[in-house]
Image (cartoon, rainbow, N blue to C red):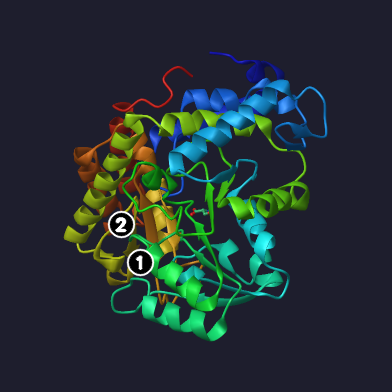
């Protein structure tokens, strides 16, 4: 079907179509990706794009905000209900912006930030030296134990007590286990620090009640909206009432100008979806699927970091297979399987190569795949990684991948 984009800008139109076909035909196992609903995409691509609305509902710097005020209020009310939060800001353009505003709300340049080591599963915006967080604040890190690959809470408590950071940030992008937020609260109380929890990766699981909620224990909770939460690309902040003014002021006018009201509308749609029983079923299946994938790969001789997963993602240590994360990612891509190389704790290789591979189940679960399809996906991965340099074999696997994908149509109305 020809669209206005195809007619007006055939180059971009064709590339968008190619990307749609790529998404349809590949096994999407990147843990931070998902397929938003057509309703979310419709709001995201709507005429709301045209509106400026600097400020907050009822307090804008522009006229004509009658309807976008109602949209933003709906988004706020839905997300507050979803996470039982006292206050919500739905304007962050991304998870990093949300984290920046959270830090700026309670820290000044040079203050101490204690975050999870990126190489142990943390995130750039939790204090990496190449990120604003590492450049503006004095960063200290905690990590996982080498023997269990679980967060070393004793070391965390000790460090918090010694350093007395202004902020402790919990959250991760490659930690396959449940984070003990009560321990983080204890660490924050020891240090008299503000506790920020970045739940970007597992927010959908929290919404479904599968992962313990940090809301209530943390002073500020940040998230993206497009990972397990399955909304548009963007961020959000939840906090307790006394911090609301500071947090809001740091988003606007602190670090952002006009909010992306089309994205806020899409967030509202996604929060509405997340409030339904279907979403809970979906998240339960995500966790079952991730566990099944990890178990299959462990059976095939891959070492799964921390021995498995309790969440939507698993991390493989490829060293016993004499493979790097980079080589595995590239071979799988040729086989039509999208993953990403990822450092594993205490990784001897640089983060451009890595010894690990991160796999996540949110996107395939959205397509309707369940345990039998995870068995098949794991089989394809095992086969591809057994001969990663055999392009002919990878091509044959790709055909099997496409056959599987066709059974679970993606965006059939497009
Ligand atoms: N880049 C995201 C991820 O893949 O986990 C985190 O922001």
Marks 2 and 1, the one that precedes in the sequence = 1
Q: In the rendered view, would you say 255 is above or below 182?
A: above
Residue 301 rendering spot, x and y as whole percentages = 20, 64
> Can you name the residue that lies furthest to the top here?
1
Q: CA distance from mark 2 to mark 1?
A: 8 Å
Give the side of residue 36 with respect to residue 4, left or right.
Answer: left
Secondary element at tag 2: helix
Q: In the rendered view, would you say 235 is above or below 382?
A: above
Question: What label sits on residue 385 in the rendered view?
Answer: 2
Task: Identify the residue shown where x is 43% and y is 79%.
Answer: 157
Say if disc 1 is inside 8 Å of ligand 1. Answer: no
Residue for badge 1: 323
Are there few (<14), some (14-19), or many (20+) residues within 10 Å of tag 2? many
Q: Nearer the viewer, residue 97 or 24?
A: 97
Residue 50 rendering spot, x and y as whole percentages = 75, 25
Residue 274 rendering spot, x and y as whole percentages = 42, 34
Q: Nearer the viewer, residue 287 or 54?
A: 54
Residue 375 rendering spot, x and y as whole percentages = 20, 45
Secondary element at tag 1: loop
Task: Identify the residue shown where x is 60% and y is 15%.
Answer: 3
């Amino acid at each position: 079907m020809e669209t206005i984009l195809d007619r007006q800008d055939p180059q971009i139109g064709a590339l968008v179509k190619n990307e749609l076909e790529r998404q349809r035909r590949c096994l999407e196992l990147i843990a931070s990706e998902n397929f938003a609903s057509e309703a979310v995409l419709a709001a995201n691509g709507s005429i709301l794009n045209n509106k400026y609305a600097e400020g907050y509902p009822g307090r804008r710097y522009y006229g004509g905000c009658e309807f976008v005020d109602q949209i933003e209020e709906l988004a706020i009310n839905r997300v507050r209900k979803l996470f039982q939060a006292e206050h919500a800001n739905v304007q962050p353009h991304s998870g990093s912006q949300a984290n920046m505003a959270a830090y700026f709300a309670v820290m000044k340049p040079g203050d101490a930030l204690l975050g999870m080591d990126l190489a142990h599963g943390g995130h750039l915006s939790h204090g990496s030296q190449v990120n604003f967080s590492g450049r503006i604040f004095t960063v200290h890190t905690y990590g996982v134990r080498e023997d269990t690959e679980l967060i070393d809470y004793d070391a965390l408590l000790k460090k918090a007590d010694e350093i007395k950071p202004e902020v402790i940030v919990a959250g991760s992008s490659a930690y396959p286990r449940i984070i003990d937020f009560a321990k983080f609260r204890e660490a924050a109380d020891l240090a008299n620090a503000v506790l920020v929890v970045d739940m970007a990766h597992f927010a959908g699981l929290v919404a479904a009640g599968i992962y313990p909620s940090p809301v209530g224990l943390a002073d500020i909770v940040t998230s993206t909206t497009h990972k397990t939460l399955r909304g548009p690309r963007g961020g959000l902040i939840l906090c307790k009432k006394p911090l609301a003014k500071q947090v809001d002021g740091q988003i606007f006018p602190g670090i952002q100008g006009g909010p992306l009201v089309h994205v806020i509308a899409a967030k509202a749609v996604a929060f509405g979806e997340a409030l339904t029983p279907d979403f809970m079923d979906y998240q339960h299946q995500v966790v079952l699927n991730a566990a099944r994938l990890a178990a299959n790969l462990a059976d095939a001789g891959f070492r799964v970091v921390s021995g498995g997963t309790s969440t939507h993602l698993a991390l493989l240590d490829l060293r016993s297979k004499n493979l790097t994360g980079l080589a595995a990612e590239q071979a799988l891509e040729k086989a039509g399987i999208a993953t990403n190389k990822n450092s594993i704790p205490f990784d001897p290789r640089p983060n451009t190569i890595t010894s690990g591979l991160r796999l996540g189940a949110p996107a395939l679960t959205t397509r309707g795949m369940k345990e039998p399809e995870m068995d098949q996906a794991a089989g394809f991965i095992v086969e591809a990684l057994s001969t990663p340099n055999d392009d002919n074999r990878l091509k044959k696997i790709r055909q099997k991948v496409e056959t599987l994908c066709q059974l679970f149509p993606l965006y059939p109305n497009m």
